[in-house]
Image (cartoon, rainbow, N blue to C red):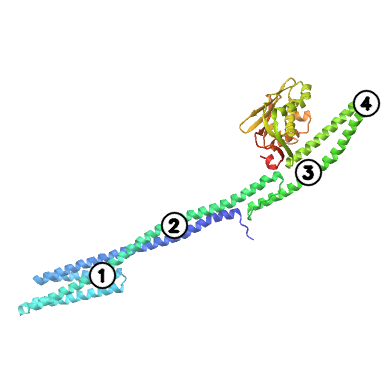
Amino acid sequence: MFKARIIHKGIALALIPLAVNTVFFVLLFSALARAKTLVNQEHKQSEILTHIDNLNVIHVNILGTLGTFAATGRKKELRLNQRLKDEARKEATAIAELTNNDERITSYLKKLDATINENSRLLSKLSGSIDDDLQNESIMNQANTLRVLIRQAGVKDRILMDLMAEQQAQLEVLNRNEEQAEEQVKVIVLTGLISNFVVALVLILLFVKDVTGRLRVLMANARMLPKNEPLTQEVTGSDELRELDTVIHQASAQLIESAEYRRGLMQMMAHDLRSPLTASMAALQLLTETQKELMERGKKQVDRINLSLQTSVDLINDLLLLESLEVGQLVLNLNRENIKEIADNAVDMVASLATMKQITISNEAIEEEVNVDRNRMLQVVTNLLGNAIKFAPAGSTVRVTTKRTDTNVVVAVIDQGRGLTPADQAKLFQKFRQTEEGRSAGGSGLGLAISKLIVESHGGKIGVESQLGKGSKFFFTLPSDNFDAGYAIVSDDTQNS
């Protein structure tokens, strides 16, 4: 079965206007050929009229010689008359040839030739009468012969006038046909240009609509791949775009299947790991509370085990939170909160860590109310402050600032650490990605990735500005009035806005 490819559509796009042009070229050449034929006929008709006009002039001259001969009787006029008759016959022959011996024209010419022959006979008779005048020939007979000649001249004149009128009428018909042919050529040219433009425009619009419409579906399906959602639209047709869309649908199905498998595996691991870890922590806590006589060394061991268990539980909780954020299933408890109070609470939570590293925390945040999930936003600010303290040199200051713009509230954590390279900045918010210094300092590499997803779930953005040797500024934005108070379930569209 034939499948129309994009190249086939492109060829059709070029060939259809070419076919339309070919049709109009054929029509145009036909019209030009007809116009040329009419021009030739008009030229031929003009020649015919010229010969008829010459014949008419000769006829007038013949009448003049007759009158002169009748008045003077000079033989010179007879010779001139004969020469004019020969010229008249030549003109008649030319007319017959130009008209291809047309029956009507031939009939006129035969009548004219008969009158010329009759004139010759009567002229001979008149000449004889003049010669015999001394033999008492009647002058009355000469006059009668002359009247007959004059009547014959009138007959020739009418024949010539009829012939000229008929040829003039044909010339007018040819002129009108030529004008019509000229108009036809103009109409064909104009119609061809307009039709060619319209056909090309329609084909281009159809091609563009077909390709761009299906490309939009293809792009929409491609954008939905990272969201692990079923693709509801399909590209129609049988060309390369359809094949590419089929591949994207297959990839989407595999990604969804893999995501479901990973989610199930994560939940199983989290449940299977968190339950015994939590039980172990509870047992250690009970042991610490009940066994007051534990040796100091034993207490330190218990504390270390408890810290390790707590770290493991925190890591599992972070993995579950990250999974919920990525699949768009995190429930946010949105309320109107004071961002300065959240910053104060975060500073309190990291105060002991700052004291250990001899770092001063300056909370310069101003009181701005935004719609946020307080606990999640506290987690973000605490995480940014913890990172700043972790990498800032002893004796330095970490600042928390806020600023309001037209549509957002910008929260920033500024440290005086060694700064970040552009390469580190590009991958900093990816999960499990850490700088060399971060890996040496410990940590899971999930904190900034989680913070990014939490901020984006609130409709904001997170970023960093840093130069080596000049410290770093981590900031995030929160819309001033984008959310109403209450519960909201984060969707993938919100995360990727």
Q: Is residue 435 visible in this depiction of the protein? A: no
Q: Earlier in the sequence, mark 2 or mark 3?
A: 2
Task: Measure the alpha-carbon separation of dots 3 and 4.
Answer: 43 Å
Task: Measure the alpha-carbon separation of dots 1 and 2.
Answer: 41 Å
The one nearer the camera, 472 or 103, is: 472
Task: Measure the alpha-carbon separation of dots 2 and 3.
Answer: 67 Å
| Quarter of the image where one finds residue 102 | bottom left
Q: Residue at x 78, y 46 (%)?
A: 261
The one nearer the camera, 31 or 469, is: 469
Residue annotated with mark 4 = 292
Q: Residue type at mark 1?
A: Leu
Front label number (1 vs 2): 2
x, y percentage for residue 26?
Answer: 45, 61
Which type of secondary structure does the marked residue at label 1 adopt? helix
Residue annotated with mark 2 = 191
Q: Earlier in the sequence, mark 1 or mark 2?
A: 1
Which type of secondary structure does the marked residue at label 2 adopt? helix
Could you say which disc has been placed on residue 263 in the image? 3
Tag 4 near tag 2, CB within 8 Å? no
Task: Measure the alpha-carbon separation of dots 4 and 2.
Answer: 107 Å
The one nearer the camera, 191 or 398, is: 398
Compared to residue 165, the image places residue 223 above or below, namely above
Could you say which disc has been placed on residue 163 in the image? 1
Q: Earlier in the sequence, mark 4 or mark 1?
A: 1
x, y percentage for residue 166?
Answer: 28, 69
